[in-house]
Image (tube, grey):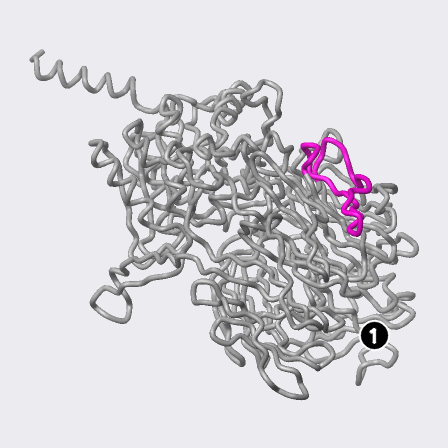
Amino acid sequence: MSLALRTCLLATLLFALTAPIFAQGTAADYQRMQQLGRMTGGKVFRDEVTPNWLPGGDHFWYRVRTGSGEHEFVFVDATKGLREPAFDHGKLAQQLSDQLKREVAPTRLPFERIQFSKDFERIIFNVSGDTFQVDRGDQSLTRLDQPAEALVSSIPAFRRPYPSTDKGGEILLKVVNETTDTVKLFWIDRDGRPVFYNDIAAQKEHERRTFVGHVWLVLNSRDQALAVYEAIDPISVLKVDGKNARELPRRRRRDGRPRSGRTSPDGQWTASIENHNLVIRQEKSGEPIRLTTDGTADKYLDDRFYWSPDSKRLIVMEVTPGQGREVTFVESSPEDQLQPKVHTFSYDKPGDKIRQQWPRLFDLEKIEELLLDRSLFENPFAISEASWQTDSSEFRFLYNQRGHQAIRVVAIDRDAAVRTVVEETSETFVDYTNKVYYNPEHDQNEIVWMSERTGWNHLYLVDAAKGEVLHPITSGEWVVREIERVDRDKKQIWFTAGGIVSGQDPYFLHHCRVNFDGSGLTVLTEGDGTHMINFSPEGRYMIDEYSRVDLPPVHTLRRTDDGSLVCELEQADASQLLETGWKMTERFAAKGRDGETDIYGVLYFPTNFDPAKKYPVIEYIYAGPHSAFVPKRFSMLDQQRELAELGFIVVLIDGMGTNHRGKAFHDVCWKNLSDSGFPDRIAWMKAAAEKFPSMDLSRVGIYGGSAGGQSALAALLWHGDFYDVAVADCGCHDNRMDKIWWNEQWMGWPVDDSYAQNSNVTHAHKLQGDLFLIVGEMDTNVDPASTMQVVNALVKADKDFDLLVVPGEGHGIGSGRYGMRRTRDFFVRKLYGVEPRR
């Protein structure tokens, strides 16, 4: 045997020994991934209840999917706790077959809506222009020449926006604006947050690709909800006529008083700003009275006037402008011209001089300014919720100190005395975006206040007149997540909570109620899962829907006074979904870095999963401290599940530094964003690999966008001994380059050396493993220069990496169709060592 032949055989043998145990990343794998939505879509039944409440508020009906193309109508009598078929579907189908001269199946009745008589004993419906009536007693069917009298329509169902889920493949949604107003279209993301997409002009329509299970919200110009719609059919048309406009529950509290009126409440004075100074005029004389003379372009008075109700005092805000930073980028390939375009937009960054405002008080009886001591509001990041008390005794506002280590309600009395009503302080940060609640009541001196002073987010009752905390309203090692409603007449608070039910995942949401004095704490929802509720129009009942990643939705009807069960409604059926080979998402919890704290995450497996084989592990990361990100609700399809289909086990984990646990858990992020919870994530994966030995921790990838892109690269800089491959999309790689409100919240102010020490640019020379950077050249969320500065540092450090700059695209392009295809290909190449789709 020749030397050349022996060398060739040896090379072949070595490749066979080192090649993956089984082939992945093939064209067949990609095809299976692309067909996953079609394969699984529409295969979960009895998973939705959309109530059609009837007048009186004690009865409703709904139509529920029971199989592929099949459904049934259900009637519920809440007074009796009765759920039953709205009629005998079999008998009706037989009679309709005779009437229509064609076969009608009882599970495929040819109508979608029904109407009830006032006594609920008869039902009317339409088929192909003909009207029929069913007697619910003897189930007899009658064809009507005209609609029967004494039949009543259902009260239109209206749900507050709820999170989108992935239930099937791509569909076309057409929104038709039949109003005379421009409407705004929002997608409700998987965390229930609205994401603006388009304005739709009056009498115009808009088409958009979406997916089964995605929820869309339409608002009018007054921010009233016109429609909440979940995409279902392959071609969906949503007609918006504006007839049922509804006010949505808001986190922003009402102010209740005119803010910017030029005229005083008694009509005797008008105010204006002239040459940056305050000028008032008495209605009778009209002669100008100049109350200030120190106004300049660098320190001026704002033309928003806060009159006391008795018209004897006026508050006007003094403003100093910020530096007005602008970010500039070049659009390389505009659609309307050959040559590039230059764009600029306003964008404050950490450490910038910002626009600030302070109240100034004027006495209209003495026609003079009353000087204020600003020590309690000296350095504002923001002043909001400003208003006078009804009796004109005080002007109160919410003061958010720059650096976010103090939030307080400040009161200025009519004689210029300044005091603290209530405050929240922290040596790290006050989570002002999630854990501050101030709802000014102009004739009340009881304030409901949110605080983490015990280490857990809870509610307190404050005597505003005395500036004293009267008592805790809630307490314990669990957290209040959001106040939904405050009923001052009944002195009750409705809120959501996490961790309140022992033995359940602490991120699961339950809906609760408590009295102002702390008594009567009632958990209104029941069941091991995360909950959302839908109230009846009169508020006496609520439909409670709960699910988990490993439990399809369960619906029950409950009483709102005590949460007691009225009746079971639906338990979703996922048997057909599981028959496709679809794998239920696995929940897993393990101890974090301290060996004591539970860390929660999930795992996705491919449909052809073989427990005898080894699979590379890919983590999808988003470690932004503003929230927590491991999914809790049931979902059939998402990007992580699709990625798993290429032969990976995909994991999501909420490590320390993320939100919605105790204060100590959250504080890990303080001046420490590069930590990203990695010690907890790595410990979790090692523990998970003991339970799921198919996890191959010798081949680990990670990817994320925005703050997740920052973390994905940080994984290779700080933990390159564990992570092998990273894809970082539109990362805020240096927190000095990113938006001010988010970064100063967690990294603090003034900007100090911690910013540089947490920067991926600073540590780029430490890169280990394979890196793929993605950025859109027109990203207005995170300055694209943040990615390019990493590129610069990597080049200077002589490091190899891949880079994709997408012309004309903005933030999150890596999660789009092209970006995700490139991401998947990168993982297949680097973790399997094969060329994708071959």
Identified at 70% across, 50% down, the residue is: 419
Visible in this render: residue 580? Answer: yes
**Disc 1: which residue:** 152
The spot of residue 712 in percent (x, y) is 40, 35
Residue 114, by quadrant, is bottom right
Q: Closer to the camera, 603 or 168?
A: 603
The spot of residue 99 in percent (x, y) is 76, 75
> Is residue 470 left or right of 104 when viewed as pictured?
right
The spot of residue 466 in percent (x, y) is 80, 48
Amino acid type of disc 1? Answer: Val
Visible in this render: residue 66? Answer: no
Which SS class for mark 1? strand
> Is residue 601 left or right of 24 when viewed as pictured?
right
| Count of all numbered marks drawn on residues in the image | 1
Q: Quadrant of the N terminus?
A: top left
Identified at 72% across, 60% down, the residue is: 415
Q: Closer to the camera, 698 or 77?
A: 698
Tell me if residue 455 is in the magenta stretch: yes
> Is residue 12 left or right of 127 when viewed as pictured?
left
The spot of residue 106 in percent (x, y) is 74, 60
Q: Closer to the camera, 227 or 465?
A: 465
Q: Closer to the camera, 91 or 828?
A: 828
Q: Quadrant of the C terminus?
A: top left
Q: Is residue 439 above or below residue 734?
A: below
Q: Which residues are magenta?
A: 452-479
Q: Is residue 572 above or below residue 682?
A: below
> Is residue 348 left or right of 8 when viewed as pictured?
right
**Crowd band around label 1 with a 10 angstrom C-alpha radius: few (<14), some (14–19), many (20+):** some
